[in-house]
């Protein structure tokens, strides 16, 4: 009986942990109470089922017992009455609080929990890790392997995520329908990582955990059904998992050992699943495919081949070229190297793998060493191959994979033997990828970084056509095919947050887009400011713009702000100049409704994306100086200009998102069934900023989901931020040096006292109705260092400055970060050394932010 009881408890834990915890969280609204009560219920089951026998419905027994355990815990906690009343009402009704839509819209407790854990107030890494731990029942070391980080680091992340939920009062509630899209990337990532843990378990004897694979596919179907119209990436994910899972039975022999892709009996594949998946892949590839769509296309090419030798490897390499640009990651690069080996042979592939090895990013990843070993075997380098195999065997934790690698180590391969050439791809799969030791798709690693895709097109002449007729074509114009890992630069604002599953330490140069990987500190995005054209010579101004662009890119800045007003060069032409002299720098273009129609703005954004394969961000400005506006016959009052800006920005965003034609009958703008050509790839959708510190400006930013940018008061005036989906940014100058005296000498030399400047500033304020200009112009008292107002008051710049040592400026920046500021637009740098000192100040700031 005890053996049966133990087996039953283990079976319920493996199959129903996520469902049980999800139900308890819905009832008790407390993450820790739910998880601890579930653990206590399982412990009680071990003892009681041995005596009383296994109940007819074990899961129901666990849930009922856990509810009683939760009540006991709540009674022991403070604020007993409030929590107990809330729990009693919830438990009695067995339902959630009424949201603003039918709860049936999310028809499953586990799916509710995924959307709940993926709360935008948590860092994206924390969202995914917490959901995997809670819903998937994955152990901390299993999640750590999925993220390619040490187990201790992942344990710290989980603890900090729970603490943030508790301290910030983040509710466990069902999101409104309109908020689901913002959480979709994290939700899809969670589902895929649950699937890949089932397809290639981190540890244990079995090669496949069917329960997790089936659960992930079921959840993907639910997510896709919730979205109308279905998201292309949700569609692609479902197709990708169906294709991987279709090979499940053929991947194992009678002894449970791994069977290579080329050796599998393809008659044992689930052809009904393949038939369901292929139309979904075609659907996902319409328009601008995302990472899951590209991975699904690769998997489809494998499943389309009737025989291993029919596989269209050149097409797979081209798809990896696009994926590597769209989603840079060392895992994707490793997959690509394996595909290159199938087209060009082992030597070019080994060069790519050795370049990856030299970075050190994948030192602890057994498949890097296994891939290298197999390529060396192909080249007849038996001794080196054996060393790499030994390293891989020492790192692998799944017993089935270990047995496979041990067999490979014992089976020498002579140079020139091509009979098993395709086996090398079996050793290259993604980060806990669903491909196990098969090469049938890219890693489920969303990576980080901005797309450098020059062009994506479907071409009938691009590459050989598979004999079965299905075709996924891409043209990667301008791609070098070189290894390209994550850039380390993140975009500003939650809309463009990308999941970082791999630590990448920049050692050659201080970077200005940074965040601590080992905790919950958000990344900091830094933009520079482009020089003003006012008073500059044509040749001198062009050179100054090019210099600032190159300095900013080398320093790791996300982008550069380009001003717009009546007295400046056209900002779009300046942005074009910046993009021609840099490779990834993002122009942040100031846009005012008074200058051009919203359709013209959207057309320019899409055109620059077409020519450069990069995004531009938009700084939405309601209006500048009154005399500039009056010269253009615009007398719209200050707050009403922000009402206009909301309509203006909504049209631009609607056109750039694609989909149905845009129709808006607003107070300021009217458009009817307006469409945009060329379409903008979704990955190049801009981050929107709204300039303004008035309540009208901040309200516009909230409505638009934009980053609100202001000129800041001293950091002491700000309170530490509570959990909020709002994105905040500030414009500030920075002069930092090794010590205080050196910094102030530079500051006073650069911005000397100027009486005429004071007069010019006073006159300028008379024609400005800017809330922040008025506020900064009338300080109650001289602000404390390092905050410095003199350049602004002398009309030498438009923002306050922070002046001091790296440590003192860094401390001020830290306070801003703790107040919720994630985007910093720093004033025009004087030289490259200036930016290097600024980077050191930000390093101090990020290092000092508590986890």
Image (tube, rainbow, N blue to C red):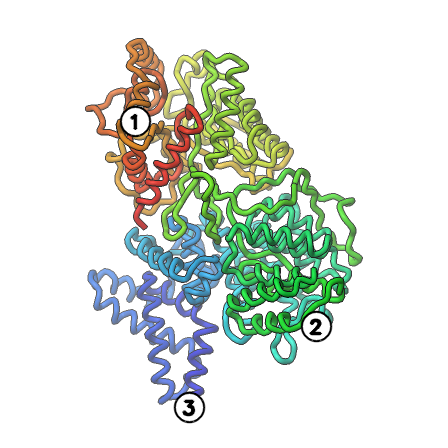
Q: Is residue 771 visible?
A: yes
Give SS at disc 2. helix
Please tell me which residue is depicted at 44% across the width and 37% down the height of the picture. 704
Res 268 label: 2
Mark 3 — residue?
Answer: 1
Q: Residues within 10 Å of mark 2 (few under 14, many from 20)?
A: few
Which-is-in-front pick, marks 3 and 1?
Answer: 1
Residue 436 position within the rendered picture, expressed as x and y whole percent measured from the top left? 59, 65
Badge 1 marks a residue whose secondary structure is helix
Kindly state the secondary structure of the residue where label 3 is placed. Answer: loop
Q: Position of residue 702 (x, y in %)?
A: 39, 37
123 or 371, which is in the foreground?
Answer: 371
Q: Nearer the viewer, residue 261 or 763?
A: 261
Number of other residues with Cα within 10 Å of mark 3, as a class: few under 14, some 14 to 19, many 20 or more: few
Instruction: State the mark number for residue 742.
Output: 1
Mark pair 1, 2: CA separation? 74 Å
Residue 525, placed above or below residue 127 = above
Question: Could you tell me if residue 490 is visible in this image?
Answer: no
CA separation in Å, label 3 and label 2: 38 Å
């Amino acid at each position: 009986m005890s053996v049966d009881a133990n087996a039953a408890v283990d079976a319920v834990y493996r199959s129903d942990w996520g469902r049980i915890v999800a139900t308890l969280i819905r009832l008790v609204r407390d993450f820790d109470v739910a998880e601890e009560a579930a653990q206590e219920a399982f412990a009680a089951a071990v003892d009681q089922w041995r005596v009383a026998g296994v109940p007819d419905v074990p899961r129901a027994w666990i849930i009922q017992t856990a509810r009683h355990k939760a009540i006991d815990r709540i009674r022991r906690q403070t604020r007993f009455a409030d929590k107990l009343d809330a729990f009693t009402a919830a438990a009695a009704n067995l339902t959630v609080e009424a949201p603003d839509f039918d709860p049936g819209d999310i028809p499953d407790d586990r799916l509710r929990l995924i959307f709940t854990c993926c709360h935008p107030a948590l860092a994206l890494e924390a969202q995914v890790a917490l959901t995997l731990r809670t819903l998937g029942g994955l152990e901390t070391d299993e999640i750590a392997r999925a993220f390619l980080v040490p187990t201790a680091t992942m344990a710290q992340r989980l603890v900090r995520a729970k603490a943030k939920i508790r301290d910030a009062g983040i509710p466990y509630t069902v999101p409104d329908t309109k908020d689901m899209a913002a959480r979709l990337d994290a939700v899809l990532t969670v589902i895929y990582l649950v699937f890949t843990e089932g397809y290639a378990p981190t540890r244990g004897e079995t090669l496949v955990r069917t329960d997790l694979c089936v659960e992930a596919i079921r959840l993907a179907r639910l997510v896709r059904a919730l979205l109308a119209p279905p998201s292309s990436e949700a569609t692609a994910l479902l197709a990708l998992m169906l294709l991987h899972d279709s090979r499940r039975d053929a991947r194992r022999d009678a002894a449970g050992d791994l069977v290579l892709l080329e050796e599998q009996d393809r008659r044992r594949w689930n052809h009904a699943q393949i038939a369901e998946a292929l139309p979904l892949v075609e659907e996902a590839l319409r328009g601008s495919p995302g990472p899951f769509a590209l991975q699904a296309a690769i998997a489809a090419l494998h499943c389309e081949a009737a025989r291993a030798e029919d596989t269209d490897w050149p097409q797979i390499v081209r798809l990896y070229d696009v994926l590597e640009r769209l989603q840079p990651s060392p895992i994707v690069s490793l997959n690509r190297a394996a595909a290159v080996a199938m087209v060009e042979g082992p030597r070019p592939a080994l060069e790519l793998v050795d370049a990856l090895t030299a970075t050190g990013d994948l030192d602890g990843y057994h498949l890097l060493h296994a891939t290298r070993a197999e390529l060396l075997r192909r080249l007849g380098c038996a001794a080196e191959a054996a060393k790499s195999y030994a390293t891989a065997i020492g790192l692998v934790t799944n017993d089935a994979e270990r047995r496979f690698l041990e067999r490979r180590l014992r089976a020498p391969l002579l140079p020139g033997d091509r009979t098993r050439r395709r086996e090398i791809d079996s050793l290259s799969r993604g980060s806990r990828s669903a491909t196990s030791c098969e090469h049938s798709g890219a890693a489920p690693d969303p990576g980080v970084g901005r797309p450098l895709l020059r062009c994506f097109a479907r071409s009938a002449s691009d590459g050989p056509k598979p004999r079965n007729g299905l075709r996924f074509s891409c043209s990667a114009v301008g791609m070098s095919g070189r290894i390209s890992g994550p850039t380390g630069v993140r975009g500003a604002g939650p809309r463009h947050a990308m999941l970082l599953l791999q630590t990448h330490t920049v050692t050659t140069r201080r970077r200005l887009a940074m965040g601590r990987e080992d905790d919950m500190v958000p990344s900091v995005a830094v933009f520079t400011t482009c020089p003003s054209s006012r008073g500059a010579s044509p040749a001198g101004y062009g050179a100054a713009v090019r210099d600032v662009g190159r300095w900013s890119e080398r320093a790791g800045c996300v982008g550069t702000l380009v001003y717009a007003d009546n007295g400046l060069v056209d900002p779009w032409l300046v942005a074009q100049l910046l993009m021609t002299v840099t490779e990834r720098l993002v122009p942040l273009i100031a846009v005012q409704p008074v200058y051009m129609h919203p359709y013209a703005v959207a057309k320019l954004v899409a055109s620059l994306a077409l020519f450069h394969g990069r995004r531009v961000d938009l700084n939405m400005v309601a209006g500048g100086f009154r005399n500039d506006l009056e010269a253009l016959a615009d007398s719209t009052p200050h707050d009403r200009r922000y009402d206009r800006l909301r309509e203006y920005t909504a049209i631009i965003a609607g056109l750039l998102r694609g989909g149905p034609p845009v129709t808006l009958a607003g107070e300021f703008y009217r458009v009817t069934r307006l469409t945009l050509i060329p379409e903008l790839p979704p990955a190049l959708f801009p981050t929107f900023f709204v300039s303004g510190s008035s309540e009208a400006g901040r309200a516009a930013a909230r409505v638009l989901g934009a980053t609100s940018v202001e000129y800041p008061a001293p950091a002491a005036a700000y309170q530490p931020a509570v959990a909020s989906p709002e994105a905040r940014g500030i414009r500030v100058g920075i002069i930092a040096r090794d010590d205080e005296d050196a910094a102030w000498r530079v500051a006073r030399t650069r911005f000397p006292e100027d009486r005429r400047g004071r007069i010019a500033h006073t006159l300028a304020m008379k024609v400005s109705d800017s809330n922040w200009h008025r506020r900064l112009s009338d300080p109650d008292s001289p602000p404390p260092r390092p905050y410095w107002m003199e350049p602004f008051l002398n009309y030498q710049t438009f923002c306050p400055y922070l002046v001091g040592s790296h440590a003192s400026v860094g401390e001020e920046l830290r306070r801003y970060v703790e107040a919720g500021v994630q985007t910093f637009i720093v004033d025009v740098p004087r030289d490259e050394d200036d930016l290097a000192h600024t980077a050191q100040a930000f390093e101090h700031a990020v290092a000092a932010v508590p986890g």
